[in-house]
Image: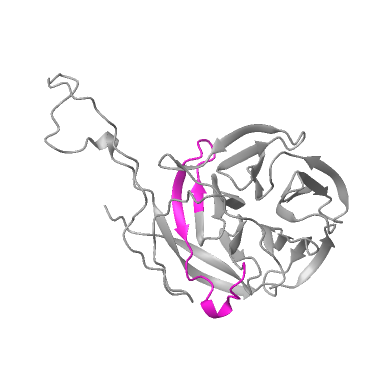
């Protein structure tokens, strides 16, 4: 079942070719991301003290800034339930927490990291398509896709404690210790008051001035928002104050072709072990969950 249709692809990629897994670092080609046009300067035919002669060179201020790009090393891999249409993923108290989607198959679950075994689960009513999830203020918050409704659970019992409404679609969910942070499939990220569940501010995510949409599963890591870009193998690193893209992670080749079904088994799911500084990623209906190390690519300037 297709979950979402692409809304017109405004994705700007720093194009990377990543090869190899099993602990090998992906290799990269030149950065071919779209560049912002240089600023236009009206010609006056006169030299002034504030407009020095450039001798045919573009002023440094008008050059687009190069955005860091990253590949990866695989440190570990573990089993992942191929029936789990992963929509939200976190790591808390030594356990993976996962929200899975699709009508009639949506759930909230706790999962054993090394075995992939589901150790606690509650089904979401069949009329809802579950989406992103996070645990904050001793509550589990879970979004739904097109139903404009979120659920609140007790983290110990999984008993539902309440509901909340929002406009637009629900995609990814995380928090920064002060606000819930929500994506809706557009280039917008909302910050919600965790008590009133009302939007307090919104940022537009951009790569050198160009909006980036299809923002999906989110994770807040060391002062940045990490976002899966739906139906791609890329993760955006986003500045939460400005929405500016400050890095691209390319995970091409992470799941071997032989392990893909050819369906909608796309990369989706980012979890971070803050105590152990471990980064976990998986995908919808992937047979594996990976612990990876992010490796910065060399500059091509």
Residue under the image location 56 percent in, 67 percent down: 291
Query: Compared to 65, does 91 lie above or below?
Result: below
Screen quadrant of the N terminus: bottom right
Measured from the top left, where is residue 212 in percent x and y?
50, 46
Measured from the top left, where is residue 23 in percent x and y?
47, 74
Query: Compared to 73, does 140 lie above or below?
Result: above
Does residue 90 appear in the picture of this structure?
no
Query: Compared to 179, does 41 lie above or below?
Result: above
Which span of residues is magenta-colored?
236-264
Q: Residue furthest bottom?
A: 258
The count of marks equals 0
Residue under the image location 63 percent in, 71 percent down: 286
Q: Magenta stretch: residue 243 in it?
A: yes
Does residue 45 appear in the picture of this structure?
yes
Q: Which colouring convention does the figure follow?
A: one colour
**Pick the front one: 127 or 217:** 127
Residue 125 relative to residue 2: left or right:
right
Residue 38 relative to residue 116: left or right:
left
Measured from the top left, where is residue 44 in percent x and y?
17, 21
Measured from the top left, where is residue 199 in percent x and y?
68, 33
**Pick the front one: 127 or 49:** 127
Q: Magenta stretch: residue 10 in it?
A: no
């Amino acid at each position: 079942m297709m979950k979402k249709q692409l809304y017109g692809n405004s994705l700007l990629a720093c194009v990377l070719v990543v090869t190899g897994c099993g602990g090998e670092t992906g290799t990269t080609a030149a950065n071919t991301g779209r560049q912002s046009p240089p600023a236009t300067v009206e010609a006056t035919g006169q030299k002034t003290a504030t407009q020095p002669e450039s001798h045919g060179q573009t002023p440094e201020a008008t050059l687009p800034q190069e955005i860091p790009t990253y590949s990866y090393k695989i440190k570990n891999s573990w089993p992942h339930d191929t029936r789990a249409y992963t929509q939200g993923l976190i790591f808390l108290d030594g356990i993976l927490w996962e929200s899975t989607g699709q009508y009639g198959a949506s759930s909230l679950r706790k999962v054993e990291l090394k075995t992939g075994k589901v150790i606690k689960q509650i089904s979401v009513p069949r009329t809802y398509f579950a989406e992103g999830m996070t645990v904050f203020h001793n509550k589990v918050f879970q979004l739904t896709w097109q139903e404009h409704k979120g659920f609140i659970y007790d983290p110990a019992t999984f008993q539902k404690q309440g509901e909340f409404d929002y406009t637009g679609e629900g995609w990814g969910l995380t928090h920064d210790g002060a606000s819930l942070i929500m994506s809706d499939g557009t280039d917008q990220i909302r910050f919600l008051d965790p008590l009133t569940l009302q939007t307090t501010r919104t940022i537009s995510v951009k790569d050198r001035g160009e909006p980036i949409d299809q923002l999906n599963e989110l994770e807040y890591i060391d002062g940045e928002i990490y976002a899966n870009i739906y139906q791609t193998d890329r993760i955006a690193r986003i500045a939460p104050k400005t929405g500016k893209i400050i890095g691209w992670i390319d995970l091409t080749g992470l799941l071997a072709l032989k392990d893909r079904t050819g369906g909608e088994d796309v990369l989706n799911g980012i979890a971070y072990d803050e105590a152990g500084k471990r980064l976990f990623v998986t995908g919808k209906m992937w047979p594996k969950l990976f612990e990876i190390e992010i490796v910065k690519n060399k500059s091509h300037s």
